[in-house]
Amino acid sequence: MTALDERDLVTSIPNLLVLTDPDVTEGYRQDRAKDPDAGRPSAVVRARSTDDVRAVLRWATAAGVPVVPRGAGSGLSGGATAVDGGIVLTTELMRGIEVDPVTRTAVVQPGLTNAEVKRAVAEHGLWYPPDPSSFEFCSIGGNAATNAGGLCCVKYGVTTDYILGLEVVLADGTVVRLGGPRLKDSAGLSLTKLFVGSEGTLGVITELTLRLLPAQPPASTVVASFSSVRDATEAVCNITRVMRPAMLEFMDHTAIAAVERHLKMGLDLGARAMLIAQSDAPGDRENEMAFIAQAFAHANATDVFVTDDPNEGEAFTAARRFAIPAVERLGDLLLEDVGVPLPALPALVDGIEAIAAQRDIVCAVIAHAGDGNTHPLIVHDPADPDQSRRAHLAFGEIMHLALKLGGTITGEHGVGRLKKAWLPDQLGPDVMELTRRIKRALDPQNILNPGAVL
Amino acid sequence: MTALDERDLVTSIPNLLVLTDPDVTEGYRQDRAKDPDAGRPSAVVRARSTDDVRAVLRWATAAGVPVVPRGAGSGLSGGATAVDGGIVLTTELMRGIEVDPVTRTAVVQPGLTNAEVKRAVAEHGLWYPPDPSSFEFCSIGGNAATNAGGLCCVKYGVTTDYILGLEVVLADGTVVRLGGPRLKDSAGLSLTKLFVGSEGTLGVITELTLRLLPAQPPASTVVASFSSVRDATEAVCNITRVMRPAMLEFMDHTAIAAVERHLKMGLDLGARAMLIAQSDAPGDRENEMAFIAQAFAHANATDVFVTDDPNEGEAFTAARRFAIPAVERLGDLLLEDVGVPLPALPALVDGIEAIAAQRDIVCAVIAHAGDGNTHPLIVHDPADPDQSRRAHLAFGEIMHLALKLGGTITGEHGVGRLKKAWLPDQLGPDVMELTRRIKRALDPQNILNPGAVL
């Protein structure tokens, strides 16, 4: 965008919050993926309303200027990486929420954090399940854009399962309202679902109608240590074939050590793997906990700890959530999000260890084990070019391993820019072409988030 | 399709099961909606494989011949109504299934009935929840094409919530595989979800990967009679704001009388409305049943019956499922499928009664009350043109009433051909145009199910 264009934007839409000070725009170049190739945006627009978003997109379409939609900037795949000369359009100031306890739905604007949504609906005895580990600072709009997951998914599903309706602004500024507070609606194409997970490439989400559940009952927790990764992952499969725990998380020894170093909560530093499971079935928790504990014991757990105390349970959950920041202190991270069908989980985790050993790099593995979604955290020092090179090689090798095992390169973070080179390997040429056909139909000028996903 | 074209089809694909005998094709002109304007197909093709479907669509694209995909023909909106000179492509012979208990998924072909899928997965201790009342004879492919619902949705959601992957043949014969046995997958656009509910207008579903749950625990049942419809619908709202029953069904007095006439099970003929609720929460059924029974009593139920006997419960569920065939014996049906946000349910049911009275027609109302999805069953005698005219007027008025109340013209049956005149009133011009853009991108020649939905 030239200076003339920029004045044009400001003049055309005088009430818009347009920021062009390089000190400010610098903070919007990257998301949490820290893409070193991020561009320099000409302007950051802080939308306060759907009208603001519409105005920006109309202007951008007329001027042919790319727009990168952005929520809280907590994305881990570079889906909100700025492009040179483009506009970063943030929805962080759009923070309204209305809860309807009878329909058990909430109408929310995209700028609220996931945690703020959870808190607002909890006041009505309701619960919004999806819980990315970043829930305190990720935005609900970004959650929808990436079809975010979290720890609850093994029982409660992912973001798309909780989105009944959307307001979306299309590339040309047209505002469409899709779905609404109805659990069932078969009228026309499932457009709501198409925009969920589209990573800002098809439209900008300006409002969401969320499906809510009655408040989650208190959960009980079982934690176990294992002297082999294979024992732990096999325990996972033996549990999920019979029941649905409310949580079933995995940490390997590198992750355990990194967390313990900072939290000092007495995690078993001699263990090769740790599993944290929860049950929240009212009236049936004892049965479920006994079953899980037994499955852990059968899989040669070296230590099994069971607690009904929600605070103790939360301490272990928090430890698991703390794994990414803890490992991050060892160096820069290349953060994977590969998933496989559950029977392949042992082979995936074994294979990741082998890749890390072969490339001589540190790689901690944490996983939403109950749904086969792992986060290998590859540590590297950018000041060591050879190590960085080996880390990047491992990054691709791990995605290829997941694909070889029938899996996905991203379970919940999205493709963004960092993983798009591997997307064709997963989808194949025909699905890529189908994707491009839809992209062209909805955004023929490629205004929206160009360079992401495709 | 001319005779030459037909020979061309048979010659091009010699192994195809092509049926052109008018005695046979006549049986494929209509689905259960009995559209009187159904066309006469030139041929019916019974696909036995994805290759068959691909061959038909390649041929049809080259020849410019329309193709109407068809499952079991149990659709209630005319989504599988034949078009003149076109091909009806049925998937009824594609009946494979493979169940994987560890991932709790099943890979199924579209021709199996919903009940056959349920039975096959039950052998592995698993459960496929969606349960249209037609589950004994509707196909799983058709369920996906319409995003079918059922009685379980109030707690367990609709078909799209259980579809993790699809194999789809596009209009030009390209076969794409979307998603797979992974609960989480954010790689690329949510194409799987786009095809669910697309009613055969974007592609032909040739394989589905279904997400399964552990077997449903035994349910307890509460049945209550009410002397006012308003009392019953308000009881519904008071229950759903606090908990999720496993079922919450409604029948009005016309439906009760029609069912009782045939089943003679002692239903309360003096009641204006009846509710049937179930709880299946292991360990918590007693609490839930007590809460529901109390909510019914507070809403002035004239009679509340509680049973833990699954057979007694199933008898009431079967009575509710029997309502459509029972009312059908009173005359031809115009079958509605309107839904509203729950707080509008009392106004919707009141308004339907008022429309029926004003148009002087018989209209029974049954409803998946817990999610606001009602099935007004408008009875008419086609030999009485004035009555039929009034019935058709009421049919449209009920859809407009639902829209005025923030609802949908179809909760779970789809738009098909019978409801497409009302779709623009629900979606508006911008969403209609967005729908057309996607249709054109995927099926530029309008080969697939022309005249349905759009």
Image (tube, coloured by chain):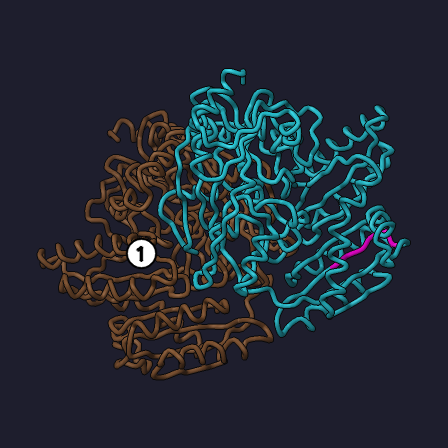
Chain colours: A brown, B cyan
Whether residue A48 is visible:
no
Q: Could you tell me which quadrant the N terminus of chain A lies in?
A: top left
- Residue A220 location (% of width, % of height): 49, 76
Above-or-below relation of B149 to B242: above
Judge left or right: residue A356 versus residue B399.
left
Above-or-below relation of B157 to B358: below
- Residue B428 location (% of width, % of height): 58, 30
Whether residue B89 is visible:
yes
Judge left or right: residue A388 versus residue B137.
left
The quarter of the displayed image where residue B144 is located: top right
Q: Amino acid at mark 1?
A: Leu
Q: Would you name the residue on which mark 1 appears?
A: A405
Judge left or right: residue A253 versus residue A125.
left
The quarter of the displayed image where residue B407 is located: top right
Q: Magenta residues?
A: B271-276
Badge 1, how many Cα within 10 Å: few under 14, some, many 20+? Answer: some
Q: Residue at x 31, y 56 (%)?
A: A405
* Secondary structure under the numbered disc 1 in the rendered image: loop
- Residue B414 location (% of width, % of height): 61, 38
Judge left or right: residue B339 versus residue A304.
right
Callout 1: chain: A
Residue closest to the eye, A94 or B353: B353
